[in-house]
Image (cartoon, coloured by chain):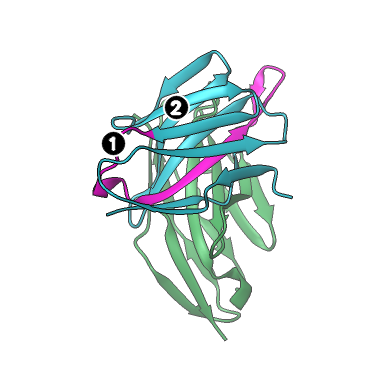
Amino acid sequence: DADVTQTPRNRITKTGKRIMLECSQTKGHDRMYWYRQDPGLGLRLIYYSFDVKDINKGEISDGYSVSRQAQAKFSLSLESAIPNQTALYFCATSVRTGTVNTGELFFGEGSRLTVL
Amino acid sequence: GDSVTQMEGPVTLSEEAFLTINCTYTATGYPSLFWYVQYPGEGLQLLLKATKADDKGSNKGFEATYRKETTSFHLEKGSVQVSDSAVYFCALSDGANSKLTFGKGITLSVRP
């Protein structure tokens, strides 16, 4: 079983619909992230969370919201989806070792969202 | 802000050819540097990393050396295989909060 699980893996929806992408992890990591991947643009950070009570905006947070329901769960919502939010979305986790951040991210397999 | 620049792609090579993928960065302080690989239909996974100047990261025959003087972290492999076909991302972390900044990625195709 995957350590970082994303659901759904694929979703097609219409403009204006509310969409939630869910992420759960069994790695015991405290830090979780949502990235978006677009061809030619690489990965861009949407939101990140260092623990349940800590949520931070990334570089492209407009149009998105998140919820950290528990240490192991981090969901991404699109309140009113629009076509330019069509992309591949990745959840990732990381861990801090003592006072040093390892910097390594562990990714889920991605959720492909298409907004018509 | 921090940024990562990768060479333009895609790259197509024959099996057993030598591979170089260029990566340069801009950052304040002393970042850690990473190469991630994304195989078709999968998420990204760490290929190698280096945490300080002159460190060499290596894994699966790939190598990259952290060059502070040229702000570079070029990925190399002496003999590529068809199974190396994937998208490769260079990334940096400022270490303070473990946010990673990624380059745009480059697609490598290796033909038999």
Q: Which mark is residue B52?
A: none
Label 2 chain ID: A
Is A82 a magenta residue?
Answer: yes
Label 1 chain ID: A
Q: Which chain is green?
A: B
Q: Relative to the observer, which residue lies in front, A114 or B1?
A: A114
Q: Which mark is residue A66?
A: 2
Residue B64 location in percent, x, y?
Answer: 58, 52
Left or right, A36 with respect to A108, comes to left
Q: Secondary structure at mark 1?
A: loop
Q: Alpha carbon of mark 1 to alpha carbon of mark 2: how far?
A: 14 Å
Q: Secondary structure at mark 2?
A: strand
Q: Residue at x 44, y 56 (%)?
A: B22
Residue A89 location in percent, x, y?
Answer: 45, 46
Residue pushed farthest top? A53
Residue A25 higher or lower than A111, as above or below: above
Q: Which residue range is magenta in the image?
A: A78-104
Residue B57 location in percent, x, y?
Answer: 65, 48
Q: Are marks 1 and 2 in contact (CB under 8 Å)?
A: no
Q: Which chain is cyan?
A: A
Along the polypeptide, which appears first: circle 1 or circle 2? Answer: 2
Q: Relative to the observer, which residue lies in front, A2 or A58?
A: A2
Q: Tell me the amino acid under the disc marked 2.
A: Val
- State whether residue B70 appears in this view: no
Is B75 a magenta residue?
Answer: no
Residue B41: quarter of image: bottom right
Residue A75 higher or lower than A10, as above or below: above
Left or right, A116 with respect to A77, comes to left
Residue for badge 1? A80
Q: Quadrant of the N terminus of chain B?
A: top left
- State whether residue B112 appears in this view: yes
